[in-house]
Image (spheres, rainbow, N blue to C red):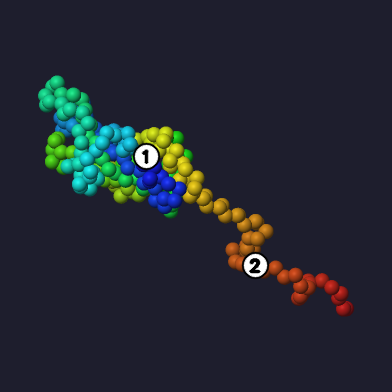
Amino acid sequence: MDAAEETPRATRPTLTVGVVMRRERVEGPMSRWQTWRWCLADVVCHDRLPALPPLTTEPGDPSSAVPIEPDAPAGPEAAPASHWLFPHFPVTLHRDDAEGYFLNLSSPQPCFWVMWRQPEGGDDALPAPQVVTLSYHDAGRWLDAQERVDQVPAPPEVRAWLADFVSAHYRPEPKRRQRPDSFQPLTDRFGQPASVSTGPRRGPGAGGPRHG
């Protein structure tokens, strides 16, 4: 991770990552309709990647994709999968979404979520990753919008980086104190508000001396 992006004064610390998509051969009956399919393989921090050329398009543009293994020849001897790297995706942390990062960290497996779209144009077309996040809330919004969202585990150094941010900015909402029963409004047997008088009773049966 770039140390310049992690300084304590940074209001929006950002991590730059690459998305690795894997094309794999479809097996079984589904292969009659679809020969290949794409799936999310990994999310890798840029400091773990070899030097990459500057980005000249939007992150996720197919023209920015880098093959990271040789393409297999077509035919029965073809390799079962191939991998493509889509670099230069920013993962920015926002203070107002600290709860979303906390929910990710407190899950059994903290992860990256990637929203991506299927390719158009046949088996040779590349997929289109759109955005990467560490926020549970972001992933939920995308799923609610019927987008394709997949996840991969976040490595230990990313979890530690995220934990530092959550520790600095996440403040759980205080639980509201439940009103004691003695403060609940009184109602009569018909559910109407009832009043209580502390003065002397008036009218028949109110007690007190009788004059014969």
Residue at 40% x, 38% y: name it. 158
Q: Relative to 174, does residue 191 appear above or below in the rendering?
A: below
**Mark 2 lies on residue:** 194
Query: Residue placed at 64% from the left, 63% from the top?
Result: 186
Q: Quadrant of residue 181?
A: bottom right
Q: Which residue is mark 1?
A: 1
Nearer to us in this view, 204 or 171: 171
- Nearest the viewer among 6 and 167 is 6
Q: Which tag, 2 or 1, sits closer to the chain's start?
A: 1
Q: Quadrant of residue 70?
A: top left
State which quarter of the image contains the N terminus. top left
Q: Tell me the element at label 1.
A: loop
Count of picture labels: 2
Name the kind of residue labelled 1 in the image.
Met
Q: Residue furthest right?
A: 212
Label 1: how many Cα within 10 Å (few below 14, some 14–19, many 20+): some
In the depicted structure, whether residue 182 falls above or below residue 54: below
Residue extending farthest bottom:
211
The picture places residue 83, in percent across and down from the top left corner, at 23, 31
Q: In this rendering, is residue 203 above or below 28? A: below
Q: Residues within 10 Å of mark 2 (few under 14, many from 20)?
A: few
Q: Is residue 162 left or right of residue 120?
A: right
Tell us which disc is closer to us: 2 or 1. 1
Q: Position of residue 60 (x, y in %)?
A: 23, 43
Asked if one can make out residue 118 in the rendered structure from this viewpoint, the answer is: no
Please tell me which residue is depicted at 78% across the width and 73% down the height of the picture: 200
Residue 144 appears left or right of 123: right
Q: Position of residue 13 (x, y in %)?
A: 39, 48
Q: Amino acid at mark 2?
A: Ala
Q: Quadrant of the C terminus?
A: bottom right
In this rendering, is residue 159 above or below 204?
above
- Toward the front, the furthest residue is 4
